[in-house]
Image (cartoon, rainbow, N blue to C red):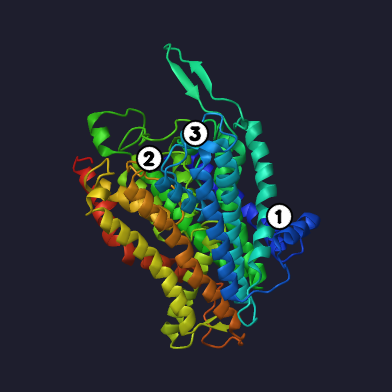
Amino acid sequence: MTMNGWLQILLFSAVLLAVTKPVGIYVLKVYDGSFRWLAPLERITYRLCGIEPEEDQHWTRYAASMLIFSAVSMLATYVVLRLQHALPLNPFNRDAVPARQAFETAASFTTNTNWQSYAGETTMSYFSQMTQLAFHNFVSAATGMALAVALVRGIARHSAGRIGNFWTDLVRGTLYLFVPMAIVFAIILVQQGTLQNFSSYVTVHTLEGAKQVLAMGPVASQEAIKELGTNGGGFFNANSAHPFENPTPLTNFLQILAIFIIPAGLVYAFGRMVKNQKHGWAIWSAMFVLFFAGVTTIYWAEARGNPIHAARGVDVVASATNPGGNMEGKEVRFGIANSALYATVTTDASCGCVNSMHDSFTPIGGMVPLVNMQLGEVIFGGVGSGLYGMLVMVVLTIFIAGLMVGRTPEYLGKKIQSREIRMAMLYALIFPASILLFSASSVVLPMGLKGLNNAGPHGLTEILYAFTSTTANNGSAFAGLTGATYYYNTTLGLATLIGRFAMHVPMVALAGFLAERRVVPESAGTFPVTTPLFVALLISVILIVGALTFFPALALGPIVEHLVMGAGKLF
């Protein structure tokens, strides 16, 4: 751990805090309809799609609209991938994507997961990358934002279960938020050296006389929305460790910032929408504390390194336990601090892009990204999904606080009763059920074990990470697991759908139920939601729920691996 590394982490934190308010104001104006600089294009879109923008949908219709749109767009992507060989913009004659992989990819990109069991530069045509994968990068992110805004409306309104218009929210999020920001960010990336072309792949001769093929393509445009929409995935298999995706220290910093910038701003917008800005900052503070704890733990673990290597004299630079720390799987351009920061941010959010390989982290360093996702990705989280996941935890926290004082819990003037708690608990239980059931099946079935490249606790961590990443709609891969099989293409694809839609419906129902509640005056039993005590209780609930659910699995995976590593054994 170095002063330089800490300064970079602190600089990131300061910039994130500085941009939260201006981005939050912009987000607020997009969704309340007061920011209409593209109004003619917006009206044309509504007319072409047959949308009534002023319609205020009941939560059941809002949820149905979201499900129908997702199902149709997923089917379209599946068809295009299966017919890829016959479609244009395929200069390298890429074959049709196999059915099992097309299903997984269509499900993954529709759900904002972007889990990839293939190498993008050798599997997908330019047509598939641009018309399907990039399309979902925009609209799946806009869908997440729409759902978060709908939940906030449910909290702020008294509207007989009406929470806005899904189609209007989808169009505004795409048109005013993601498209303009992605264009600006893509231009910056191109200026810094990120590829953006339709050129043929280039064959070069190395100094040793060998031939190497360098992939080309429209990379910067994909990269920009990949981070801003917390989509993840990558044009290249090496993701943001590839110099054509992430060429400079500045692009690395901006990519990390882009992942958090909209989720952080949305929390500020939430405070304005519910007319309680202090509560918005309290939630932001809880998210930041969890983020900083995570990056500190990874940085410590990776800088400490592997004691087995230190004992054998493998690394010889400068650290008390392991000189030089653990540089395995990391780009030397970025080092340990930026690898730790990127890994923390991408798994706090539902992004999944990486600039280092998490499978090569130390057991504790690799456990933190896993835990970040298992907490429900509520630490800023994905665009939209981070806020609504955190608000579900807030509802549970308020309910627990109400039990403590023996009163009916109230949240921002609305009583939390049995219907709301049932929906919140259903949301919270579906998530671990998917992860643990799929993981348990995979460690006992021959089809699941066949994909492992490592034995023992590390192999368990690889399986647990895969189903955590897909259910959490994160998409980052721990590596070491062969995911391009019938078994894993199918189960991981199903996990992405469960993590998105099985959890969205009870969340939208919660929004509708809250919208039906009348606002009541604060009483002596009202738990304050702007104090450090609230922040501490909220963090405690998040950690306790995660620890009670996943600790047994973590104990058999990364924790036991850390202990046996100290005894001189590797897996």
Against 313, residue 151 (above or below) is below
Count of residue discs: 3
Residue picked out by circle 1: 176
At label 1, which amino acid type do we have?
Answer: Tyr
Give residue 94's mark: 3
- How far across and how far down the image is residue 185, in percent? 65, 42
* SS category of the residue bearing label 1: helix
Report, in whole angstroms, how far the alpha carbon at label 2 lies from the one at label 3. Answer: 42 Å
Q: Residue at x 50, y 63 (%)?
A: 286
How would you rate the neighbour count of disc 3 (Cα within 10 Å): few for under 14, some for 14-19, many for 20 or more? some
Residue picked out by circle 2: 303
At label 2, which amino acid type do we have?
Answer: Ala
- How far across and how far down the image is residue 533, in percent? 48, 72
Q: Identify the image quadrant of the C terminus.
A: top left
For residue 89, say whether it is visible: yes
Task: Quadrant for residue 551, please give it.
Answer: bottom left
Against 194, residue 284 (above or below) is below
Q: Earlier in the sequence, mark 2 or mark 1?
A: 1
Task: Quadrant for residue 335, please give it.
Answer: top left
